[in-house]
Image: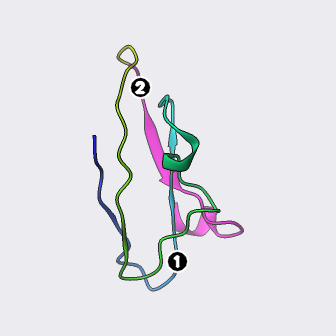
Amino acid sequence: MRINVGNELDEASTVHWHGLSLPAEMDGGPHQMVEPGATWSPNFTIDQPAATLWYHPHPDGTTEHQV
């Protein structure tokens, strides 16, 4: 699966997944910021049972503002 995460905000952001079994470098979080106007395209294979999954922004110190 490939997901194109485009940042159309005027500040850096990131996306962090919950419930997915995936490689750490595809998990997002404060260490993988997406700058304004940039796109991050994580890709990974989903190999797990059906589940409730979700995602949210996860920039250090401003998560609550972006959520």
> On the image, numbered disc 2 is attached to which residue?
52
Asked if residue 67 is positioned above or below residue 17 in the image, the reply reads below
Q: Which of 66 and 24 is in front in this view?
A: 24
Q: Which of 45 and 15 is in front in this view?
A: 45
- The span shown in magenta is 51-67
Left or right: residue 51 compared with residue 67: left
**Which amino acid type corresponds to the residue marked 2 in the rendered image?**
Thr
> On the image, numbered disc 1 is attached to which residue?
12
Q: Which residue lies furthest to the bottom in this view?
A: 10
Mark 1 lies on a secondary structure that is: loop
Q: Which of 9 and 41 is in front in this view?
A: 41
Pointers 2 and 1 in contact (C-beta within 8 Å): no
Numbered mark located on residue 39 in the image:
none
Residue drawn at the location 65% of the way across and 70% of the way down? 62
Left or right: residue 15 compared with residue 39: right
- Within 10 Å of the Cα at label 2, are there few (<14), some (14-19), or many (20+) other Cα atoms? few
Residue drawn at the location 40% of the way across and 18% of the way down? 48
Please identify, in this view, whether the residue under mark 2 or under mark 1 is nearer the observer. 1
Rendering quarter of residue 6? bottom left
Residue 35, x across and y down, in percent: 47, 79
Mark 2 lies on a secondary structure that is: loop
Rendering quarter of residue 33? bottom right
**Which amino acid type corresponds to the residue marked 1 in the rendered image?**
Ala
Residue 17 among magenta residues: no
Residue 65, x across and y down, in percent: 59, 69
